[in-house]
Amino acid sequence: MTRVPNGYCSHECTQDLDCCAVMGECPDGLPQVCAPFESTGGKNCFLSCEASDVTNAGFTDSNAFCQAKANSAFICRSTGGGSQNRKVCVPNG
């Protein structure tokens, strides 16, 4: 995805179950969600930083979760997908 700073490697999906559906795709077992990103018109898989996923992983801060589980340059933010909006980890930019 080029709409994220420095790009973001993902794949299209229609529902959360499409994310991590292929064996070995998500070896860390972290929660992935299927969400629209801004106004791209499609949905992609992202590492979730929704409140329940963050607390289930033992974190109280969603940005700290993203930085620990994805990359030190990532933050937790809204996908901006309107009514299907989700909270996901993406590069800070």
Image (cartoon, rainbow, N blue to C red):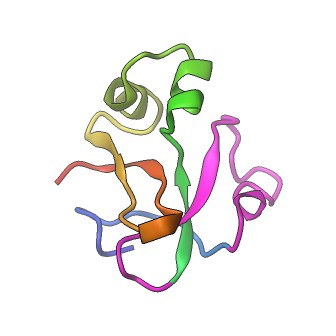
Q: Is residue 26 above or below residue 7?
A: above
Q: Which residues are magenta?
A: 14-41
Specify the principal SS of the magenta part.
loop
Q: Quadrant of the N terminus?
A: bottom left
Depth check: give the residue in front, 60 or 27. 60
The spot of residue 42 in percent (x, y) is 52, 82
Decide whether residue 31 is among the magenta residues.
yes
Question: In the drawing, does residue 27 fall left or right of residue 43?
Answer: right
Q: Residue furthest bottom?
A: 41
The spot of residue 34 in percent (x, y) is 61, 62
Depth check: give the residue in front, 85 or 15. 85
Residue 40 visible:
yes
Question: In the drawing, does residue 9 fall left or right of residue 45?
Answer: left
Decide whether residue 7 is among the magenta residues.
no
Q: Is residue 73 above or below residue 68?
A: below
User: Residue, x 39% and y 60% (percent of image)?
Assistant: 79
User: Residue, x 62% and y 49% (percent of image)?
Assistant: 32
The spot of residue 85 in percent (x, y) is 46, 60
User: Residue, x 30% and y 41% (percent of image)?
Assistant: 75
Q: Quadrant of the C terminus?
A: bottom left
Q: Residue furthest front?
A: 83
User: Residue, x 44% and y 48% (percent of image)?
Assistant: 87
Q: How many marks?
A: 0
The spot of residue 72 in percent (x, y) is 29, 33
Q: Is residue 47 above or below residue 35?
A: above
